[in-house]
């Protein structure tokens, strides 16, 4: 299992548009084969940095997932929403693997 961290640089005056974009992925990402952890919008500190995080089995599974997401009606609509509203200035992905055991939750 690997985790994809997407770092977004967003327009600080369009945070609400990013939040709508994030909510729109709730169904499409899992349906297309990834385990959505969540999207994170700015709250304190930087007003231009946001994240999306999900788990996927492997890089090969990621390629299949991306193809399904690009063909998914909800995915197409959300990509178009982002293009039209232009709230994303930059997007970077990194794939990481868990290197420690998570702590118990309180």
Image (tube, grey):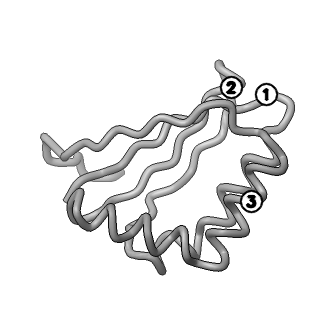
Q: Residues under labels 1 and 3: Cα distance?
A: 20 Å
Which is more N-terminal, label 3 or label 2?
Answer: 2
* Residue that badge 2 annotates: 48
Would residue 72 appear left or right of 86 to someone viewing this image? left
In the rendering, which numbered label is found on residue 80?
3
Q: Residue at x 51, y 48 (%)?
A: 52
For residue 15, which quarter of the picture? top right
Q: For the residues carrying marks 1 and 3, which lies nearer the camera in this image? A: 3
Residue density around tag 1, few if under 14, some if 14–19, many if 20 or more, within 10 Å: some
Q: Where is residue 36 in the image (x, y as percent from the top left)?
A: 45, 63
Quarter of the image where one finds residue 34? bottom left
**Percent of width and height locating residue 3:** 30, 51
Q: Which of marks 1 and 3 is nearer the N terminus?
A: 1
Compared with residue 11, is residue 88 higher up or lower down, i.e. above or below? below
Q: What element carries label 2?
A: loop
Q: Name the residue under label 1.
A: 12
């Amino acid at each position: 299992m690997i985790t994809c961290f997407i770092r977004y640089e967003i327009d600080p005056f369009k945070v609400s548009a990013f939040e709508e974009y994030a909510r729109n992925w709730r169904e499409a990402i899992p349906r297309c084969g990834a385990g959505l952890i969540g999207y994170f919008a700015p709250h304190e500190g930087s007003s231009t940095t946001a994240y999306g995080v999900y788990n996927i089995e492997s890089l090969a599974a990621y390629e299949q997932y991306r193809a399904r997401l690009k063909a998914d009606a909800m995915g197409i609509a959300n990509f178009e929403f982002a293009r039209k509203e232009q709230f994303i200035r930059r997007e970077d992905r990194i794939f990481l693997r868990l290197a420690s055991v998570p702590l118990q939750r309180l």
